[in-house]
């Protein structure tokens, strides 16, 4: 489990996170939901130790962040980090050379799933295919937890559907996934837990199925109550 307790984060004098507390379990997809600037990326970066926070605690399977614990997590940012000149197969080779927990078989499996060709150059990928390659690079790492920043943002409906299919496949099954979004409607059916953010804090955290079954509400219904009510 990834557990955040009372995380406070400032950029200069501006408080971005003001006591963020939530948990993300293995075997579940947890979705951080909030408007642009709510602090979603900052939360993922804090978990990864990429940005310092001033107060609070983050633990992974009960232990504090350390380089060893970070091996359990893979972070998929919302921007392409591979060199534009590379072909997909070069990226695979690079990962194989430098990362012990790179699973080349799985990378090829996902490549086929997305119907991408390993000869394609990173610079020539469409926006949707860029998102798919980003996702692929993260999912092919042997990690217990996957953090993904806006994996569905700005891409067409067909690419979104393909990406959604990966989320409900064995490629994600046992892992703990945290994804961020400011647009829940397309992915509501995929997520197990929703964490609603506003004003630097968690306004509500709930299991989507429980709320659906016990209260007959969708995630969007709950969002309306929290953000507009
Ligand atoms: N390096 C930085 N220096 C100063 N302020 C920053 C920095 N990075 C982010 N911020 C501010 O922190 C706040 C939260 O940003 P963050 O990117 O975490 O939000 P977000 O919820 O991921 O937004 P989006 O949906 O647009 O990606 C914003 O007000 C942003 O301007």
Image (spheres, rainbow, N blue to C red):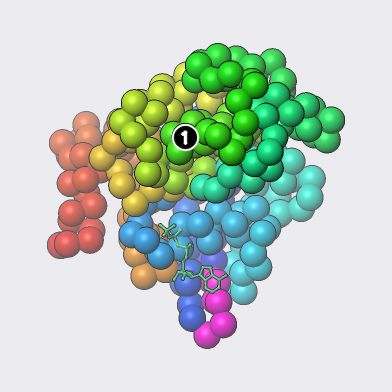
Q: Main secondary structure of the magenta part?
A: strand
Question: In the depicted view, which residue is nearer to us: 139 or 225?
Answer: 139
Q: Left or right of 33: which side holds 80?
A: right
Magenta residues span 8-13
56 w.r.t. 137: above or below? below
In the displayed orientation, state which residue is furthest to the bottom. 13
The crowding category of the residue bearing disc 1, from other C-alpha atoms within 10 Å (few below 14, some 14 to 19, many at least 20), is few
Task: Please name the residue shown 21% across and 31% down the image.
Answer: 213
Task: Please name the residue shown 18% across and 56% down the image.
Answer: 225
Question: In the depicted view, which residue is nearer to us: 16 or 118?
Answer: 118
29 w.r.t. 221: above or below? above
Residue marked by disc 1: 126
Q: Residue 40 in the image: x percent, y percent?
A: 46, 57
Q: Left or right of 82: which side holds 186?
A: left
Residue 60 visible? The answer is yes
Q: Residue 72 in the image: x percent, y percent?
A: 69, 39
Q: Left or right of 98: which side holds 44?
A: left
Task: Examine the structure image and report whether residue 168 is included in the region drawn in magenta.
Answer: no
Q: Is mark 1 within 8 Å of ligand 1?
A: no
The quarter in which the C terminus is drawn is bottom left
Asked which secondary structure carries label 1, the reply is: loop
């Amino acid at each position: 489990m990834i557990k955040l307790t009372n995380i406070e984060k400032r950029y200069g004098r501006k408080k971005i996170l003001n006591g963020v507390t939530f948990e993300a379990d293995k075997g579940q997809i947890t979705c951080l939901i909030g408007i642009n600037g709510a602090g979603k990326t900052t939360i993922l970066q804090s978990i990864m130790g990429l940005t310092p926070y001033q107060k609070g605690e983050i633990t992974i399977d009960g232990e504090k962040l350390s380089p060893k614990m970070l091996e359990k997590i893979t972070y998929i940012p919302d921007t392409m980090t591979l060199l534009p000149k590379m072909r997909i197969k070069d990226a695979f080779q690079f990962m194989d050379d430098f990362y012990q927990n790179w699973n080349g078989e799985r990378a090829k499996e996902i490549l086929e799933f997305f119907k991408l060709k390993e000869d394609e150059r990173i610079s020539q990928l469409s926006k949707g295919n860029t998102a798919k390659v980003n996702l692929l690079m993260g999912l092919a790492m042997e990690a217990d937890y996957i953090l993904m920043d806006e994996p569905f943002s700005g891409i067409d409906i067909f690419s979104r559907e393909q990406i959604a299919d990966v989320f409900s496949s064995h490629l994600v099954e046992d892992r703990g996934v945290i994804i961020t979004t400011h647009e829940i409607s397309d992915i509501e059916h995929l997520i197990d837990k929703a964490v609603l953010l506003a004003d630097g804090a968690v306004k509500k955290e709930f299991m989507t199925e429980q709320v659906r079954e016990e209260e007959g509400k969708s995630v969007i219904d709950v969002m309306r109550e929290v953000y507009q009510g």
